[in-house]
Image (cartoon, grey):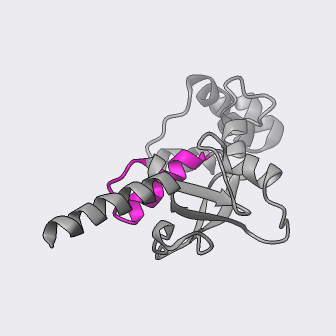
Amino acid sequence: DEKDFYARRGIELKPEYAEEVNSPEKKRKTGLETRDAVMPNRNSSPSGVASTLETAMNDQLDFQLEPDRCGISIQQMPPLNNPSLRTSGRLRVNSIKKYLLQKLGLKDAPSSIEVLCNGDPIGDELSLTFILRTRWFNTNKILTLKYRLSEEFAVSQRKFNSTDTEEES
């Protein structure tokens, strides 16, 4: 019974639903404490709660993050322990860059990483759903994004490291 389900979890019913569930007419007509009273369908929900929940569940997307091995060696990065991920299709590339920095233990800015799809760098503002629909051509394979250090960052790091080496000698 849904009323018990919500009660066990300490969730109070909205006043308008509580009245409907307890209404004797509803119980007599259906023989049940109606599901619509507790979980209205998306068409009858004034607040759109059910449709928002349904949309959130349907926009989950599986993808993989792998280091780009095609670039020059100073741009290469280590692989993730778990490269397969599932998240909302609304997730943007900038958030993926922040995730990579955190998982790889780097303290650099998100602009220090490039994310690529089919070998092309993709913009920070693009969502995974957009990338899947417009940039991913292998429709029978899981979306696979590659990552590497941006060229500017890799070159600046190389210059920085070479000055450190010269000073030590």
Image spot of residue 57 (x, y percent) = 68, 51
Residue at point 56%, 24% (across, down)? 15
160 relative to 58 in the view: left or right: left
Where residue 40 appears, x then y in whole percent? 72, 35
**Residue 52's image quarter?**
top right
Left/right placement of residue 64 relative to residue 109 reads right
Please give the count of numbered marks on the rendered protein: 0
In the picture, measured across the screen, residue 130 lies left or right of residue 87, that is right
Q: Is residue 107 above or below residue 42?
A: below
Quarter placement of the C terminus? bottom left
**Looking at the picture, does residue 99 appear above or below residue 36?**
below
Instruction: Report if residue 97 lies within the magenta region.
Output: yes
The answer to whether residue 65 shows anywhere in this view is yes
State the image coordinates of residue 145 (x, y, percent, origin top left): 65, 63
Q: Nearer the viewer, residue 126 or 108?
A: 108
Along the viewing direction, whichever of 86 and 140 lies nearer the viewer: 140
- Provide the residue span drawn in magenta: 91-109
Viewed as shown, does residue 5 lie left or right of 74? right
Q: Tell me if residue 150 can be seen.
A: no
Q: Nearer the viewer, residue 74 or 12?
A: 74
In the rendered image, residue 95 lying in the magenta stretch gets the answer yes
**Foreground residue among 70 and 141:** 70
Is 91 situated above or below 41?
A: below
- The residue drawn where x is 46% and y is 76% is 81
Residue at the image position 68 percent from the left and 51 percent from the top: 128
Q: Residue at x 29, y 65 (%)?
A: 162
Percent of width and height locating residue 20:
67, 28
